[in-house]
């Protein structure tokens, strides 16, 4: 994961160094362990490696040329504190049976359809409007523990983006280097041409 992230960050440094400046300092291993204990799960090693490189990102730039753009295809990397806060909020809604009357989940790939939100999903990036990219530790049959999926707050689709964090970042860096994913100006703002690096 470290090599993949290094390639990704090098691309950002060359093409939009402000994004790199928005990354936080590394998380402490004690912070990671505390979050795991509170959520009752174990983070995949690849995600722990990422947190030990950067504990998410700030939604501001020291010197801002453009409006803020999240590093993960316009999605902002969450800090450990934000990950736990998101999990606690969703867990409370689940426990209060808020999701019981929601539409049935439409799974694109091996995602369990009985959960609108699953307490074994780790939100790792957000678009700021309640839509997240998650690591799925409880996949449906045929899935992979640690697969990367979408979560939409007002849409029932749950899509498997990739079988693992490493595989996903391998595809991201490939698509950035060959120009499939790129930064563009849209209405005076700098944005990625692919939201959340979700592919087609």
Image: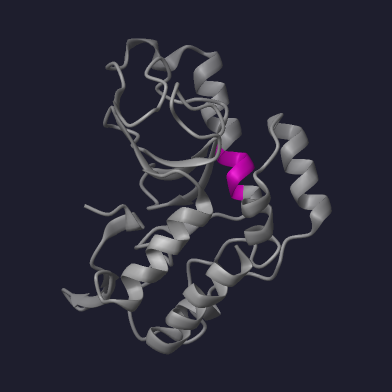
**Position above or below: 66 against 32:** below
Which residue is depicted at the point 40% across and 58% down? Answer: 75
146 horizontally vs 197: left or right? right
Taking the magenta stretch, the answer to whether it contains residue 121 is no
Which residue is depicted at the point 55% across and 15% down? Answer: 95
Q: Main secondary structure of the magenta part?
A: helix
**Position above or below: 1 against 106:** below
Which residue is depicted at the point 29% across and 57% down? Answer: 195
Which is more toward the observer, 86 or 33?
33
Which span of residues is magenta-colored? 82-86
| Residue most extreme to the right | 30
The answer to whether residue 189 is visible is no
The answer to whether residue 137 is visible is yes
Which residue is depicted at the point 26% across and 61% down? Answer: 194
Position of residue 21 measured from the top left corner of the image (x, y, whole percent):
54, 80
| Residue most extreme to the left | 187
Position of residue 62 measured from the top left corner of the image (x, y, whole percent):
52, 83
């Amino acid at each position: 994961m470290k090599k993949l992230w290094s390639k990704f960050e090098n691309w950002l440094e060359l093409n939009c160094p402000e994004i790199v400046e928005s990354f936080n300092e590394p998380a402490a291993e004690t912070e990671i362990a505390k979050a795991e204990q509170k959520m009752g799960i174990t983070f995949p090693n690849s995600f722990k490696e990422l947190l030990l490189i950067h504990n998410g990102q700030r939604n501001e730039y020291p010197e801002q040329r453009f409006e803020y753009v999240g590093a993960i295809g316009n999605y902002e990397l969450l800090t450990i504190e934000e990950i736990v806060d998101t999990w606690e909020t969703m867990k409370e809604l689940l426990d209060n049976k808020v999701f019981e009357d929601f539409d049935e989940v439409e799974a694109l790939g091996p995602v369990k359809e009985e959960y609108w939100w699953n307490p074994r999903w780790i939100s790792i990036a957000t678009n700021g409007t309640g839509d997240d990219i998650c690591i799925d530790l409880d996949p449906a049959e045929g899935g992979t523990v640690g697969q990367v999926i979408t979560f939409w707050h007002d849409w029932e689709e749950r899509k498997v983006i990739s079988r693992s964090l490493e595989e996903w970042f391998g595809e991201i860096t490939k698509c950035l280097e060959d120009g499939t994913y790129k930064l563009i100006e849209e209405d005076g703002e700098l944005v990625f041409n692919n939201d959340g690096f979700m592919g087609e």
